[in-house]
Amino acid sequence: MLLHVPGPMIETEGKVVRPSLWKYRYPLFLITLLGILFTYQLAVVLLLRKPKQTIDGSFTGSKILNPYENWDNEKGEKISLHTHSDEVWFTPERHTVAEITNEYKKEGFSNLAITDYGQISDTEDKTYIRGFEWGQNVKKRHILAIGIKKAIYDFFPIYASRENLNWVMDRMKKLGGYVILPHPKLFDSYSKEEMLSIEGFQAVEVYSPYGDDSKILDSLLSNGKNIHCMASDDLHYFPETIVNKFDQPFWKDMIQTLGHQRGRKGESFLRYVVTNAGVSNETSVLQALHSGSFFCVKKFFQGAEDPKVPLIRVNDKHQIQVASKERYLEIRFIGKMGEVLQVNPDTSTATYEILESDPYVRVELIALTGSILSNAIVRGQ
């Protein structure tokens, strides 16, 4: 008998009785499972890790590196890089890839990435950008990989140390992924201190439905990490006006209703990146991401006109020249530790001369319908 422990024989009215732990089988079974899970988690935490190796420092050098030097016009391409579909077995109530791509196309998006949890979309449509979101832990310490061809299993369902996260991001980069820290303000999944202590990511979502905070960039840039901004819808559902147009089965309507996904505004079309004109397929978008040659945009409300991104040039006098066809409420030049170096109100052009004390400068533009962030213009050798 399972879990039968022999003991001394006791005679009771002519019958032989052996004391047994059988009545405790369920608690013992649960304890055994917890022990196996604890042993597994401890093993992967100790084995699958990569210690931090880089030494961070300020940007130095006489050369000014401008990620927008090759931009030839202001039109740009709208790209959404964080959306979730119904292709994962535990998210059947979400929208199909076709529904997502069609709706974003109607809103003027040139392309988007499908980034489902734990797997890469395998539908026949190969035009959209591949990616996936790693991490099932309760604290929401997820990692987004764009352009990756193979998903990485989450070996850390309960806990992952900073060295474990380094190991995951290192594998993602080796598989061709552009690595992003998503929604850092959701449950405080990534504090500023943690982001300074891990390496391997190339961008952080500073515009997210779960919290907008562009100053996250300054804490990283000020410590010598040339991290890019990221703006993402993190789409899980569309607003009711769009869902009503879909021809979806009744069971999906029912699950969406029970999950309180119906009748809400949704997260769509408000946060995205803009790449140079003609940069819209997966290969060219990845090149733009790696070089930082894109803007992060947040629209203030759905249905608003898209704010226009500017042209940014750096001349021989180390002057940053910003010019646009749109008249902005403000053009701000931001420096080390988030210091506001200069503000130009109510204008379509602005110029800032980079000082010797400026390791980097980034630009924030406030328009009537939205805000735009540039990636940093930095010093280098």
Image (cartoon, rainbow, N blue to C red):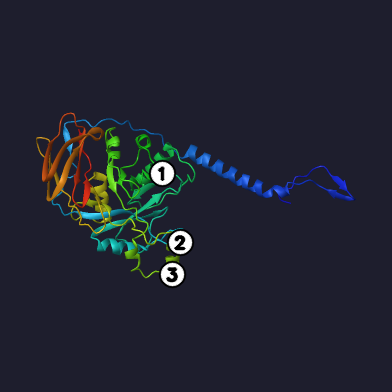
In the depicted view, which residue is nearer to us: 162 or 367? 367
N-term-proximal mark, 1 vs 3 = 1
Q: Element type at marker 3?
A: helix
Mark 2 is surrounded, within 10 Å at the Cα level, by few (under 14), some (14 to 19) or many (20 or more) other residues, namely few
Residue topped by disc 3: 250
Mark 3 is surrounded, within 10 Å at the Cα level, by few (under 14), some (14 to 19) or many (20 or more) other residues, namely few
In the depicted view, which residue is nearer to us: 323 or 51? 323
Which kind of residue does numbered mark 3 sit on?
Answer: Phe
Which kind of residue does numbered mark 2 sit on?
Answer: Leu
Q: Residue 363: x percent and y percent?
A: 19, 41
Which kind of residue does numbered mark 1 sit on?
Answer: Phe
Q: Residue 369: x percent and y percent?
A: 21, 52
Q: Element type at marker 2?
A: helix
Which numbered marker is on residue 258?
2
Residue topped by disc 1: 187
Give the farthest residue toward the top. Answer: 357
